[in-house]
Amino acid sequence: MCGIVGYIGDRPAAGLLLEGLKRLEYRGYDSSGVALLDDRITCYKRVGRIANLAGIVPHGLTQTVGIAHTRWATHGGVSDANAHPHLSRNKKFAIVHNGIIENYIYLKNMLAKAGFAFSSQTDSEVIAHLLEKNYEESQTHDFEEAFNTTLRMLEGTYGLVAMSADHPDCLMVARKGSPLVLGIGSNEMFVASDVSAFLGHTDSVVYLDDYEIAKVTSSSFQTKDFRNEPTEKAVSKIEWQPDSLDLNGFPHYMLKEIFEQPESIERGFAGRIVETMGTTKLGGLNLTPAELFNIKRVCIIACGTSYHAGLVGAYIIEELARIPTRVEVASEYKSKNPIIEAGTLYFAVSQSGETIDTLLSMREIQRKGGKVLGICNVVGSTIPRESDGGVYVHSGPEIAVASTKAFTSQLIVLTLFAVMMARMKDMSLNTGKRLISDIKKIPECIRNILGHAAHIESIAGKLKDAKYFMFLGRGISYPVALEGALKLKEVSYILSEGIPAGEIKHGPIALIDKTTPVIFIIPKDDQFDKTLSNMQEVRSRGGIIITIHTECPADSADYDKLKSLSDYMICVPAIDPSLTPLLTIIPLQLLSYYIARDRGCDIDKPRNLAKSVTVE
Ligand code: M6R
C-alpha cells in the first residue's frame, strides 16, 4: 500500500518521478505528491489520481533530486494536506513513508511540546519534524546521523526515503516492513516500492532487506543494518520488459491481463514438465526427493484471490497426490498462535510477495521451526526472499487491482506440484502423461474461451443492473464460485456471494427471487448431477440461471438438462476434471469486467482498494 519513488541523478527529476508514480498508482491512489530539491525543497501535492498531480507540477523544472509518493490512506483522511511528501517545520527536510508509525501519538505530543506545529493528521509527518529536531540538536549537523537517530525513535513499519536541503547530494533510505528497491543507473539512482517505477531506465536492482539503511548518491549506494554494520548487497537483473507495463491497445489492464492468460500459463509450466516420466519438476523447492516423499500434510496460507487459488490447489493435491491439505486465511492464521507440525509443508501463496498478513504468517511458521515455500509472482519481493524455497509463477506484471492472470498461474504451479507428488506416490505413468497432455492444452482452451468474449459481454449487458449475484459450485468448483464472486464485487461493487451449491437450502436460497442472477459452475465431473438438482431448486424459485459448463454434444442428455434449466449458457472446453477451474474462471473474470465496464466503474483501480496490502 502506498508507492514510493525517489530519484537522484543528472536528469530533471519531476517527469521521472511522475512516470514512476503512474506505474505505482496501483499500490494506492487516494492522493499523491512530489518534492523536488535544489537549494530548497519545493513540494506539490494533490488529492486523487496522479493525473491531478501532474496537472499542477509545472513543466520544465530542472531539479535533479526528488521524492514522490502515491497514498492509500491509513492515518488521516484523504486530503491534500495528508498527501506525502511531508516537510519539516523549517522546510529543509522532506520524507515519503509507506507503513504505520505506531508510537506517533507519543512522538507528536513530544514534538508539539517542543514547538512543532503539524499540518496533517498523518502518523508520517512526525518523521520529518524528528529529522529536523535531531539534526538541529546534534553537534555535527550530519544528515545521516540525524536519520539514524530518528529511526531509533520510530516504532512500527516503514519504507522511508528522506532528503535534506542542506545535503542535496544524497537520499537516505530505510526499510522495516515495507518493501524498497534501489535502481542502479549510470550517473543516476532510483529508489522505489517496486521495480516497475523505473523499468525502462535501468534493469539493475538491489533489493533492500528489513532493518536496512541505504545512503544513495547519484553514483553510489552504501547499505548497513540497524546496528550500523555495513551489509553486502547483490545487484540483480530485472526480467520484466518495459513494454509489459503498457496497455497494448486494451482499454483496461484487467482486460489485457485476462487476455494474457494463455501466455502467462504457458510460462508457468514451461521447463517444468518431464514428459517421458509423466511428471513435473519444480527446482526452487530446495527439497530432496526423500524429503518430498516424507511430506505428510500440506498447509497453504494466503489472502484474497491467492487464498482461492490455494483452495483449488488443496482439492487438486488431495485428489491427485492424496496428501491432506488445508488452506488458511493469512490474516486469521497469524493471530491464532498456529500449531506447526513436523511433516507439514507450508506454502505462502502471493502475487505481490508483499502481503503483510501472508508474510507475518510465514515468519511465525519459520520461527516455530516450520519450512515455508513461496509461490509468488513478483521476483525479488519479500516472501520469496525470506522463504525456504519456492516457485515463481511468471505471470508477468499484474497491474489491475483485481487479480486475474496471477490466479491461473498460481493454479498451474499448485497443479504441477500435485502431479509431481502424485507421481512419487501411486499415480501411474499413463495417468501422469494424460494429465501433462491436458495441462499443455490449457493455453489453447483459454484462447478458445476468449474467442467467445462477445457472448459473455452480451450476457453482462443483460445482468449489469442486478443488485445481488449468487455464485454456486460444488467440489473443486466451489472455490471458483468464491473467486467469481470476489472479482465481481471488487470491480463492480455489486453484492456477490460464492456458496457451496449444496448449502443453499440451508439458508441462502431465501435470497433468491426472479431478479437474482445465480451463476452455476457445473463442469462435467462427479458433482454434475447433484449440481443439476441445485439448479432445479433455483429454477423453482425463479432465479436467473447462468451456467458455466464444459463442452458436451448438443444432442446429449447432459446438454438437454443444462439447457432446460439455464437462462444463459457459457461453454468451456472439456478437460480433466481437476483442471477445470483453470477454464471455468475465465468467463467469470470476463463477466465481472464487462459488468463493471457497463456500470461505468473504475475497473483497474476500484474504490478503497490497493493492489499490494502491506498493512495489517
Ligand atoms: O499479492 P497477494 O496475492 O498476496 O494479494 C492478496 C490479495 O490482496 C489479492 O488477491 C486481492 O484479494 C485482489 N484484489 C483480488 O483480486
Image (cartoon, grey):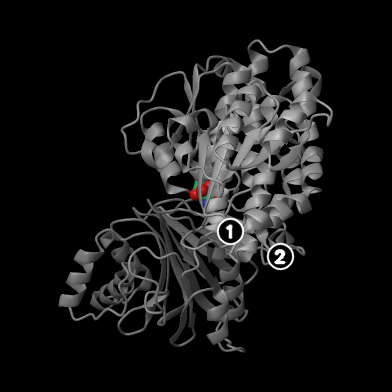
Query: Given the image, on which type of amino acid does mark 1 rest?
Result: Asp
Say the numbered circle drawn on residue 37: none
Q: Is residue 603 left or right of residue 138?
A: right
Query: Given the image, on which type of amino acid does mark 2 rest?
Result: Pro
Q: Residues within 10 Å of mark 1 (few under 14, many from 20)?
A: few
> For the point 65% across and 10% down, which residue is it?
426
Q: Pointers 2 and 1 in contact (CB under 8 A)?
A: no
Residue 463: x, y in percent? 63, 54
Which of disc 1 and disc 2 is earlier in sequence? Answer: 2
Q: Which residue is mark 1?
A: 465
Q: Which residue is mark 2?
A: 251
Which SS class for mark 2?
loop
Is residue 281 something that shows in the picture? no
Residue 204: x, y in percent? 64, 58
In this rendered view, identify the residue nearer to me: 394 or 603.
Answer: 603
Which SS class for mark 1?
loop
In this rendered view, identify the residue nearer to me: 220 or 529.
Answer: 529
Q: Is residue 536 left or right of residue 231?
A: right
Nearer mark to the viewer, of 2 and 1: 1
